[in-house]
């Protein structure tokens, strides 16, 4: 088997007496779109925090493209090509849409410290290429029409999309998405699905998608990992996971599953 792009290897993370992740292992191949699901408190965000280097694991390792990225720091993880979005909107409301995207590509500007760590020379931006790149990112994400609007003035769905645009400005090889559909209405959800599909199919972007919206995660994911109370209880195709009695059991009574 070829080396996976991301390998989570026996990760345990404790917070005091609480075990948020217990011996979690899974991998994601280059070009794959994998879903990570589980009821509230299952450890999904903690898994993202550990993978993206904001929280060190108590034990275990995270490998990205064969390199040990356990414990980050997050700037190194991004420079190596692994970016994330946040569960809440994380854009600067008092800056324009274009300025928010600019913030996302700062690490790629030739001469910055982080880019010397990356070794990805195709990824570097010369200062005179910045404007064009901001526009590229805004076009890919269908945000160009709002280029000069204050981020805080945008509808919620657009603010969340801007969060994705900021992450894409780092031109990641892999993107971790933490509940991108949360709070979106039906139409915004469909637009999100179209964007993620396009990024996957046209850009070949590798993605790990945490999502409560079952219909969305089932429709987009090639493979799904199920976490319950910090432990992986199932992994397989959307169909396998949906039919798995342990998964159905874990979700019984959880209203989110009504989406499926
Ligand atoms: N920084 C932290 N300090 C203490 N406990 C935490 C911290 N982060 C997460 N937890 C706990 O870890 C568990 C998993 O949380 P989380 O990863 O946010 O779950 P999910 O994203 O699946 O809802 C929860 O019990 C949560 O309270
Ligand atoms: Mg979470």
Image: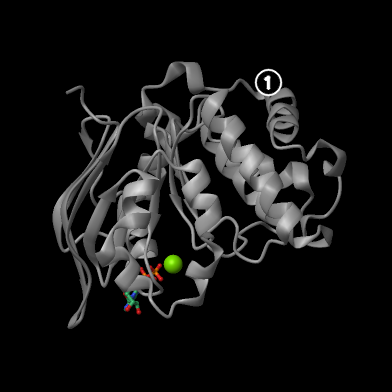
Provide residue 107's location: percent of width, then percent of height. Answer: 52, 36
Taking depth in this image into account, of 44 and 66 the one nearest to the observer is 44
- Image quarter where the N terminus lies is top left
Report the residue marked by disc 1: 129
Q: Quadrant of ligand 2?
A: bottom left
Residue at 20% across, 22% down: 2
Residue projecting furthest to the top? 122
Taking depth in this image into account, of 27 and 59 the one nearest to the observer is 27
Q: Is residue 13 left or right of residue 111?
A: left
Provide residue 63's location: percent of width, then percent of height. Answer: 22, 39
- The quarter holding residue 197 reads top right
Q: How many marks?
A: 1
Q: Is residue 255 left or right of residue 181?
A: left
Residue at 26% across, 72% down: 229
Provide residue 71's location: percent of width, then percent of height. Answer: 25, 53
- The quarter holding residue 109 reads top right
- Residue 126, placed above or below residue 104: above
Provide residue 35's location: percent of width, then percent of height. Answer: 41, 49
């Amino acid at each position: 088997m070829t080396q996976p792009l991301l390998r989570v290897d026996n990760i345990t993370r404790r917070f005091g007496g609480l075990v948020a992740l217990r011996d979690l292992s899974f991998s994601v191949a280059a070009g794959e779109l994998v879903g990570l699901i589980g009821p509230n408190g299952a450890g999904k965000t903690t898994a993202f925090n550990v993978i993206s280097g904001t929280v060190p694991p108590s034990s275990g390792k995270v490998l990205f493209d064969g390199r040990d990225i356990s414990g980050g720091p997050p700037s190194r993880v991004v420079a190596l090509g692994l970016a994330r979005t946040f569960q809440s909107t994380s854009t600067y409301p008092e800056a324009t849409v274009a300025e928010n995207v600019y913030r996302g590509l700062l690490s790629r500007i030739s001469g910055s410290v982080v880019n010397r760590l990356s070794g990805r020379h195709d990824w570097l931006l010369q200062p005179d290429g910045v404007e064009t790149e901001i526009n590229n990112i805004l076009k890919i994400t269908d945000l160009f029409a709002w280029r000069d609007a204050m981020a805080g003035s945008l509808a919620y769905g657009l603010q969340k999309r801007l969060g994705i645009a900021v992450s894409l400005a780092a031109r990641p090889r892999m993107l971790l998405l933490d509940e991108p559909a949360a709070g979106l209405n039906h139409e915004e959800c469909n637009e999100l699905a179209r964007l993620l599909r396009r990024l996957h199919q046209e850009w070949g972007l590798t993605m790990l998608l945490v999502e409560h919206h079952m219909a969305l995660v089932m429709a987009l994911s090639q493979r799904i990992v199920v976490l319950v109370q910090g432990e992986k209880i199932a992994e397989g195709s959307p169909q396998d996971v949906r039919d798995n009695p342990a998964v159905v059991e874990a979700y019984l009574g959880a209203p989110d599953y009504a989406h499926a």
